Image (tube, grey):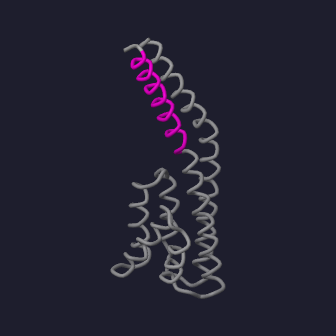
Amino acid sequence: MIFIKYILIFFIFAIFIVIGNSYSKKYSVREKELKEILNILNVIKAKIKFTGQGIHEIFEQICIINQDNIGNMFKMANEFMEEECASASFEKAADLLEKNSSLNKEDIEAIKSFSKMLGNTDIEGQVSQIELVENLIKKQIEQATEEKRKNSKLYKTLGVTAGLTITIILI
C-alpha cells in the first residue's frame, strides 16, 4: 500500500515538472515561429523582386516547403484567395494562426501589417512593405528572446517547486 502511495506521489511530482516545462516551451516556440516568419518574408521578397511570380504562386510554394503552423497560415491564405483579395485572405489566415500558435497579439498584428499592400501595389511597393514588416518581426524576435530568457527558467523552477511542495504535503 505504501509503495503505491509513493508511486502516485512521484507521478504528481512528474506532472508538475511537465506542466512547468510546457509553459516554458511556449517561449521557445514563439521565438522559433517568429524566426520562421522572418525567413519566409525574405523568400517572398526575393521571389517578388526577382521572379515576378504572383502572390498565389508564391504562397503555394511556401505551403509545400513549410508544413507547420506558419506554412498552414500561407496554405489557408492561399485557399481564401480563391474567394477574396490577397490582403483580406492573409488577414483571415493570420487570425486563425493566432489560435493555433504561440504568437501573441503584437506578433499577429506585425504579421497582419504584411497584408496591407499585398497584391495592391507594384513590385517596389510590396518589397518596401515586406522590409518594413521584417523590421517589425525583428523587434518581436528580440522581445521574444528576452521573454524566453526571463520566463523560461521561471516556469521550469515553478513547476519543480510546486511539485516538491505538493509532494512534501502528501508525504
> Observer-nearest residue: 43 or 116?
43
Please tell me whether residue 99 is drawn above or below residue 57 in the rendered image. above
Please tell me whether residue 169 is drawn above or below residue 17 in the rendered image. above
Q: Is residue 138 left or right of residue 106?
A: right
Q: How many marks?
A: 0
Could you tell me residue 151's position as x and y percent? Answer: 58, 36
Residue shown at the point (51%, 81%) measured from the top left: 55
Q: Is residue 20 magenta?
A: yes
Residue shown at the point (58%, 72%) measured from the top left: 129
Tell me the quadrant of the picture where the C terminus can be found. top left
Question: Residue extending furthest left?
Answer: 83
Q: Quadrant of residue 48?
A: bottom right
Residue shown at the point (63%, 66%) measured from the top left: 39
Tell me the quadrant of the picture where the N terminus can be found. top left
Could you tell me residue 20's position as x and y percent? Answer: 51, 33
Could you tell me residue 51's position as x and y percent? Answer: 63, 87
Q: Is residue 66 left or right of residue 93?
A: right
> Observer-nearest residue: 67 or 28?
67
Give the magenta-colored segment's residue range.
Answer: 3-26
Q: Is residue 4 magenta?
A: yes
Q: Is residue 42 left or right of residue 82?
A: right
Please tell me whether residue 31 is drawn above or below residue 120 in the rendered image. above
Please tell me whether residue 167 is drawn above or below residue 132 in the rendered image. above
Residue shown at the point (42%, 55%) measured from the top left: 100
Could you tell me residue 63's position as x and y percent? Answer: 50, 73
Q: Kindly report the secondary structure that dominates the magenta region of the rendered protein.
A: helix
> Observer-nearest residue: 52 or 69?
69
